[in-house]
Amino acid sequence: MAIHHLESVFFREKVAEALEDQTLRGALQNATGLFRQRRLAATASLSDWEKLRDQARAIKAETLTHLDHYLPEFVAKAESNGIKVHWARDHQEACQVISQLVSEKQARRIVKSKSMTTEEIGLNHVLETDGAEPIETDLGEWIIQLAGETPSHIIVPAIHKTKAQIADLFVDQLSIEPTQDAEELTKAARRILRHHFAQADMGISGVNFAIAETGSILILENEGNARMSTSLPKVHLAVMGLEKILPRLADLEVFLRLLPRSGTGQHLTSYQSILSGPKRNPDQEGPEELHLLILDNGRSAILAEEITRQSLACIRCGACLNACPVYQQIGGHAYGSVYPGPIGAIITPQLAGLSETKNLPYASSLCGACRDVCPVKIDIPEILLHLRAKSVEAHENGKEAKGFRMWAWINRSRFRFVWAHRLARLGGRIFMKNGQPPQWLQRRAPVLGAWAKHRQVPTLAKRSFREIWKKELSRKQP
Ligand code: SF4
């Protein structure tokens, strides 16, 4: 398993649970609707939006095709800047490297800024097992940590929670006076988090982009917590997937215009920190040591195939989640992975393998809304179909594959086709009651039972078109 806390195997059960939860669905509708509106307004303010998307796609394609050149270039520059670079082939190796570093530095209090990559490797769990105290400092992530949950959106981790639920959580966990005032709740969070920043031995962050030309990393955020996490503690560790590289500093201009507009509908994120090494003299701000862990964890395999390679162009803006009609109904937890929504439906099976995630490529109506909003033009429906084909190949003796083989066998012969329809019509007349198949058939064919639960099964016409044509219509032809 390459992804921590993977529960995609329970996708169907989790979907059923989510669809029953009206509070969750209300919160999702409000939040995703708001983000979609903001995104539309922000993208309309740029006349060259489509050109920017093309440029971003071209830059990412060039980088991923030549990662064997850009990654070593980045590492050489980063090391010459004083950054200590570590490598990890998988999530276990990543956690070992980080555990060792935390132990060497005797770090007990650790402040973290938002990082999907550390969620992917389950870092908090490992740090807690080692006796350290990791504190999430992004407000949404902190709320999720207090609630003992996992994020349900890649940029808005607590999107599934209402204000009232957060207020109750703060009263329970922080013993504050009951209030539903958002400003008061935020002030309480800030007071406590500031204390953690001041006490921290180490800061851990993610990375939005890594620039090969300069050996720098860029971190984007809106709350200032990433800047505090990366500058106040003596040691800063950044964790990034190997696909985060951009060739040149000038490339940032394209992505800094695309990412915030796509994600939150902002023209710019509030804080943009470019870090090019630890502080060089004691009077400067910043950490004394800057470590960078570069994670593979299945990415090299994704890179190897041309069709899947585009998945690694993702800049984690979250726009495809907000646009997806499936995500809008079921939210992030139903996907059973730290990566939910359309991007999760393609990334999770590629990182973790299809055996436990084979439902995810089907969590889509293939409407293409994700492809239309993606700032780097990832063709998510194309990859979903590719993964579905792989899943069918891998399960060629499964019930679905057998069913389709039978369907193909029937349809290859006119004789079988006609008789199958006659039998189906007869069966329908005898067994169907009010558009519902009999219970014994539903038990033997659970897929039919699940389908019929909320629908009427259409009954076949008394006579097929062929029969009507043969007996009546053909005679009317001149
Ligand atoms: S796939 Fe595209 S839209 Fe979805 S998170 Fe990644 S960059 Fe954003």
Image (tube, rainbow, N blue to C red):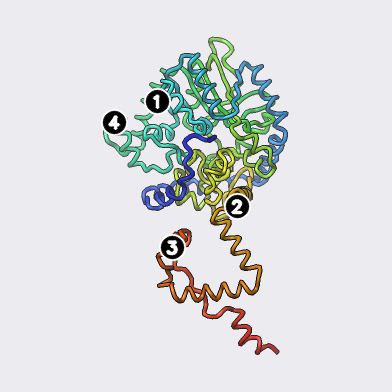
Q: Residue at x 52, y 77 (%)?
A: 461
Three-letter code, disc 2: Glu
Secondary element at image label 4 = loop
Q: Are marks 3 and 2 in contact (CB under 8 Å)?
A: no
* Residue 193, numbered circle: 1
Instruction: Work out how far the residue at label 3 is from the one at label 4, CA to CA, in angstroms.
Output: 53 Å
Vertical side of 30 occupied by 426: above or below: below
Instruction: Work out how far the residue at label 4 is from the one at label 2, CA to CA, in angstroms.
Output: 57 Å
Q: Residue at x 34, y 34 (%)?
A: 185
Instruction: Work out how far the residue at label 3 is from the one at label 1, CA to CA, in angstroms.
Output: 54 Å
How busy is the neighbourhood of tag 3: few (under 14 within 10 Å), some, or many (20 plus)?
some
Three-letter code, disc 3: Gln
> Percent position (x, y) of residue 298?
60, 35
Three-letter code, disc 4: Ile
Three-letter code, disc 1: Leu
Which one is in front, 134 or 319? 134
How busy is the neighbourhood of tag 2: few (under 14 within 10 Å), some, or many (20 plus)?
few
From the image, state whether disc 3 or disc 1 is nearer to you. Answer: 3
Q: Is residue 29 left or right of residue 172?
A: right
Label 4 beta carbon within 8 A of ligand 1: no
Q: Which residue is mark 2?
A: 396
> Percent position (x, y) of residue 176?
28, 31
Q: Which residue is mark 3?
A: 442
Q: Is tag 1's residue or tag 4's residue first in the polypeptide sequence?
A: 4
Which one is in front, 211 or 297? 297
Q: Is residue 243 left or right of residue 339?
A: right
Q: Which residue is mark 4?
A: 176
How busy is the neighbourhood of tag 4: few (under 14 within 10 Å), some, or many (20 plus)?
some
How busy is the neighbourhood of tag 1: few (under 14 within 10 Å), some, or many (20 plus)?
many
